[in-house]
Amino acid sequence: MSTFGKHFRVTTYGESHCRSVGCIVDGVPPGLALSEKDIQPQLTRRRPGQSALTTPRNEADAVAIQSGIEDGVTLGTPIGMVVLNKDHRPKDYSETDIYPRPSHADYTYVEKYGVKASSGGGRSSARETIGRVAAGAIADKVLKLAHGIEIVAFVSGVGNILMDRDPSNPEFIDLLSTISRQEVDAAGPIRCPDESIADKMVKLVETCRDNHDSVGGVVTCVIRNVPIGLGEPVFDKFEAELAHAMMSIPATKGFEIGSGFAGTAMLGSKHNDAFIAGNDGRLRTKTNYSGGIQGGISNGENIYFSVAFKPPATISKPQDTASYQGVDGTLAARGRHDPNVVPRAVPIVEAMASIVVLDLLLAQNARSSLAGLAE
Amino acid sequence: MSTFGKHFRVTTYGESHCRSVGCIVDGVPPGLALSEKDIQPQLTRRRPGQSALTTPRNEADAVAIQSGIEDGVTLGTPIGMVVLNKDHRPKDYSETDIYPRPSHADYTYVEKYGVKASSGGGRSSARETIGRVAAGAIADKVLKLAHGIEIVAFVSGVGNILMDRDPSNPEFIDLLSTISRQEVDAAGPIRCPDESIADKMVKLVETCRDNHDSVGGVVTCVIRNVPIGLGEPVFDKFEAELAHAMMSIPATKGFEIGSGFAGTAMLGSKHNDAFIAGNDGRLRTKTNYSGGIQGGISNGENIYFSVAFKPPATISKPQDTASYQGVDGTLAARGRHDPNVVPRAVPIVEAMASIVVLDLLLAQNARSSLAGLAE
Amino acid sequence: MSTFGKHFRVTTYGESHCRSVGCIVDGVPPGLALSEKDIQPQLTRRRPGQSALTTPRNEADAVAIQSGIEDGVTLGTPIGMVVLNKDHRPKDYSETDIYPRPSHADYTYVEKYGVKASSGGGRSSARETIGRVAAGAIADKVLKLAHGIEIVAFVSGVGNILMDRDPSNPEFIDLLSTISRQEVDAAGPIRCPDESIADKMVKLVETCRDNHDSVGGVVTCVIRNVPIGLGEPVFDKFEAELAHAMMSIPATKGFEIGSGFAGTAMLGSKHNDAFIAGNDGRLRTKTNYSGGIQGGISNGENIYFSVAFKPPATISKPQDTASYQGVDGTLAARGRHDPNVVPRAVPIVEAMASIVVLDLLLAQNARSSLAGLAE
Amino acid sequence: MSTFGKHFRVTTYGESHCRSVGCIVDGVPPGLALSEKDIQPQLTRRRPGQSALTTPRNEADAVAIQSGIEDGVTLGTPIGMVVLNKDHRPKDYSETDIYPRPSHADYTYVEKYGVKASSGGGRSSARETIGRVAAGAIADKVLKLAHGIEIVAFVSGVGNILMDRDPSNPEFIDLLSTISRQEVDAAGPIRCPDESIADKMVKLVETCRDNHDSVGGVVTCVIRNVPIGLGEPVFDKFEAELAHAMMSIPATKGFEIGSGFAGTAMLGSKHNDAFIAGNDGRLRTKTNYSGGIQGGISNGENIYFSVAFKPPATISKPQDTASYQGVDGTLAARGRHDPNVVPRAVPIVEAMASIVVLDLLLAQNARSSLAGLAE
């Protein structure tokens, strides 16, 4: 449904063509300095129309906090947030009344709910993610202040142009340790921190745009400074919660943590992360194929994972398909569409990661508060 | 924590060295013919020691139903199930008292809970999965009777030996439509239905065993005959629930649905699954890159996904690592260990998939029961 | 926290002095004709300033639906609703900065959250209940259309003036079978359907008002036409869910179902509700001490329960108390306050009852959909 | 369903005539010394056959811990517990195959689940409460060690023989501050600490027994030393969680906190609990009509509440009723039955209270751990 998280919990509402989209964030720690200024930047990074590569709409997406804050400080009560929809009249989608768009949610929404929304798959629109990003920005601030936790996502693949994200590659491991959101944005519109690869990605996206086609990509994300001990086995392991969160983002097709699918081809003797003494008295690992999680619990190393995004289903070329009634026909191309969405997915991936980490941190803090009681 | 599912819900308990492992399954539909005979086969497929390739222990793992059934029929009340541990005395793990095993959960469990269990990471043992498999067997039966749903998993990769699981490959798509559990088991100990590939996998595992090393693999699973409309956007999309379930299985490193990571390199015009008229009056898709899910909701096509399993962390060769106190040393090799666990993961993947599907089916049935109320 | 319900689920936000209050209602059946007109009447019944007996403020409390509806029909997606706060600047509560108001939530909120809101106990304000009433109005409509379910609450006690609500009393039982919301409102400002008792109640409230004091009361509620079989033992029995819902309403001190506390004094041979044949082929009970629920499950008889509300803590006379610093002093009286809130509690009780019934109906419909599967 | 609690969570299984009853307790703090010896005493207080007043069966009800403990210390993993059923063959209930027992759950269970269990309402048997009591005993120990919390219940009413539980009565308030479980048990089989009243209660129960009838009663419970700040508004207020927990116990008809229903007749000026300086620097209240909870949050005073139990439905005299087919007839009396169950309800009420308090304590500790973060 539309609620995520147990202790830190976001509930979202809103389609593309209704009055507003928004969310209620429950479980926000009290006494936190917070205002729209903390939230708007990630919303702005998320919105479309940021570059020539993406759809040239310009939605302001200004968030208005409704509740839960007084004198700039959180009360510990739920924070309601609203972002108005600019044009909330249903658009003229007459053709999509006849044809369900291929690989869109039009057909499955009609079958599931029995109601055809003017916008096709009502909540499958990317606009739904605004509530996630707003909630994630709050979690971000809490994590930063509490433990200096840093969460940074970037584009590591577009089409067949891929960064080398092999954990044996010291450059990749080094990048994970140092990359910042500022650097990601500074790297250009594609949000890939490797300049030469980014150039190729941009060219590929431009080619797709010129061909009225689209292409997918991969977002990689690192979470630094996570305390040891987060994750709630056996069903709510850290990677399971991350996978749930990521695979709930529209257009995702895959998730991998640490060595991922490539790790399946490795020998155990190489894949095992040997322990070494750390500077601060705690154990570290020499390598990090585990991706910072062992047995579903954070081990203090950098947590990193990647998410696969399919090519956007909306393309600017006609498509042979069938109508709702099963009659063959052609869905005509209309307007211009994003040939690639992964740069905009970056803040969404960060947001969902923030929510997961804060939720697990609260769970572990609850446990720790009563651990080892002496008789 | 140790509960999974909302409407059909399993709660598990048990470590390797305690009295028993087991589970409580809540939300079981009443009036279902059910006995241990429905549950034991999958438990038997799960247990170790089934072939020369795996650890030569022979645990009977006989399940005893405690409650929820009378005269062979479910009452609709919770079903308690218990599987005794054969030897519930903690083993002699003296060396692992000194060294946390690399890439095991020993270290993270101690850090998280502050208690060192004799078995290392208490609940990270594969024995924990017995409760999942028992619950999944019940879900299996319900799904089979209600909609003829079939869930079949198989090994599609061991090390670098991989089946071609490209959805453009008609043989792969055909396999997904026809493969049965019987065929998977008949294909040999590695549970890969492609005989020539299976042979290579077996040889690789044998080499690893002889080298006292281990290797990972991939399990692919198909779910057939799923009704259209299952999945609970926006956070509990079908693929998000599957990902959560799969990534909660020990040793998993990745999840992909449909085209997965390879799909990110495709063009939208190819990746889009065009609609065609189906024989039964409903729409079908010409291709199935979506993996049977669009917008987080099943579209009636086969749902298929793959799960990456890392090489087992326990290997039969000495490992240079550090002690809990941060002193460098060598963890000696002990006994024989499974060089590869993916064949045994097959019924676990099936079980978690069954639980997810039944849970989502109940959610959608609840909704449908009150949809479209006339004034 | 601020979410109630599992299948039909309301999440609320908002304090007295923030921008708005509102809610997100998830799990609304799709295909339901719905607009603000369905929701406003109950909000209007809830708002203060409706009569000379209550606070002479006049808040419009106009609800604006944000999402989840198109062309006047629900989409099955979450319905966001917002009610603006007229004056969202924090009021001048300088004296309550010094003294926590006795039997208010000022003190406990500060201790729990560590933040002092200008309005004292931020979310303990009755304004919080707007979201509940809005959600309940949706549930009301669903229940009415699906099963003709009617939920009617009324004031059965103010101070020591009490209706006879003994289930042995045929007039009371008859009232439960027939009373409508229209009749309750027509009975006058106190919302007690017994005219002679209502008069006495009004006089008592007026006396309290003139004495700058307050008085409590009892709200009784009946739920008619509930299908047999609702309620989820063992922890989520029908009466347990109702009790949870009712005791979460501000100022409640007690809950009783059927014979209630008085029933404890009865003999089993009288208290037992003997079965008789009903007209429609199903069993009925001769008496209804059970209150329509047996073993936590509805039996098809009228469900009725009562809720105790304490005298409002805010009174218009000075009170000797202590400051936050523990210094004895006097909290001066300020302004006029409601001497009695039970008439306004009527729609809140109805709302929470509606939410509970719909949630349990969805749970049971899910179960029934897969019950008795034939092999 | 059969799970209660969010952070500290119990899931139960079992009917009267199956192999065993039991539970899984999740979220147990790690590092706690725990064995069957901590759990058995409350189970023993719960079991039937303890005195001449109750059914003369003698069930041993010996609990066996299955998991989650090693070397006498909790691991932080789920604790499975099993209590064998002595005679798990369904009894000869042939007559109740024809007649649903009045005010029992036989009829509603058949209607809800569509399956007739030999024991009538399968999970409505008091035997279901064993899992609750076992889980509560663990919570008890945690609360005692963490904060010296004491939870003591006693019988305050049988039939029309009632202790004076008016919070204006200093003897009652004093009793709440001092009563211990030992004193409750020492007071005799009826578990009422007022000796002269207890004698009358015993006589009433004996009369009922001799008349083959039954009678109800009231259990009052006090929770001492609860930290300020527990309770999760707005829906999971402390009293709402308690009410949910208590009204889920079989045979309950009402719940009241603090002044309860009697409080509705009071004036606000008297009912308000004025603050005074406490010895330890924190605020106390002069009176305690609030019952230790204000705004849904504990204020540090004693929390006390009462629970109404109806007369047992099973009586030893024939009852005129109707068969499942709606044919009038007489259900014959069989065997001897408990004329009153409230003494046995005492440990069940304590158990559910313990679970609620620990669950809320963990929630608040999680919040506090991140409150007031400095920038």
Image (spheres, coloured by chain):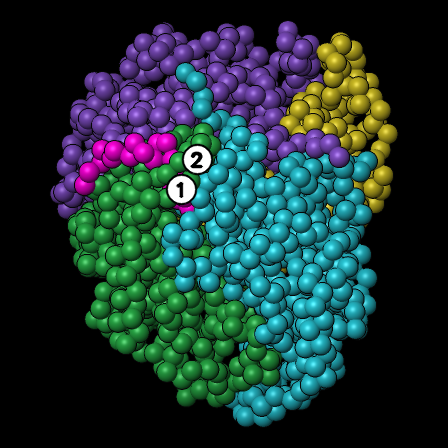
Chain colours: A purple, B yellow, C green, D cyan
**Callout 2: helix, strand or loop?**
strand
In this figure, which residue is indicated by the disc labeled 1? C320
**Which of the image's four quarters has the N terminus of chain C?**
top left
Residue located 35% across and 65% down the image = C158
Residue located 30% across and 31% down the image = C94
In the image, A36 versus A217, the foreground residue is A36
Whether residue A294 is situated above or below residue A89 in the rendered picture: above
**Could you tell me residue B244's position as x and y percent?**
52, 38
**Could you tell me residue C193's position as x and y percent?**
29, 73
Q: Decide: marks 1, 2 in contact (CB < 8 A)?
A: yes
- Residue at mark 1: chain: C
The number of callouts visible is 2
In the image, B359 versus A166, the foreground residue is B359
Q: Is residue A78 left or right of residue B337?
A: left
In the image, C297 versus B184, the foreground residue is C297
Dots 1 and 2 on the same chain: yes
Give the amino acid at mark 1.
Answer: Asp
**Which of the image's four quarters has the C terminus of chain C?**
bottom right
N-terminal label among 1 and 2: 1
Residue located 78% across and 53% down the image = D40
* Helix, strand or loop for the magenta stretch, by majority: loop
**Callout 1: helix, strand or loop?**
strand
**Could you tell me residue D142's position as x and y percent?**
67, 40
Quarter of the image where one finds residue B253 = top right
Q: Which residues are magenta?
A: C86-104
**Is any atom of residue C324 visible in this view?**
yes
Q: Is residue B85 left or right of residue D295?
A: right
Whether residue B6 is situated above or below residue C219 in the rendered picture: above
Q: Residue C328: which numbered mark, if any? A: 2
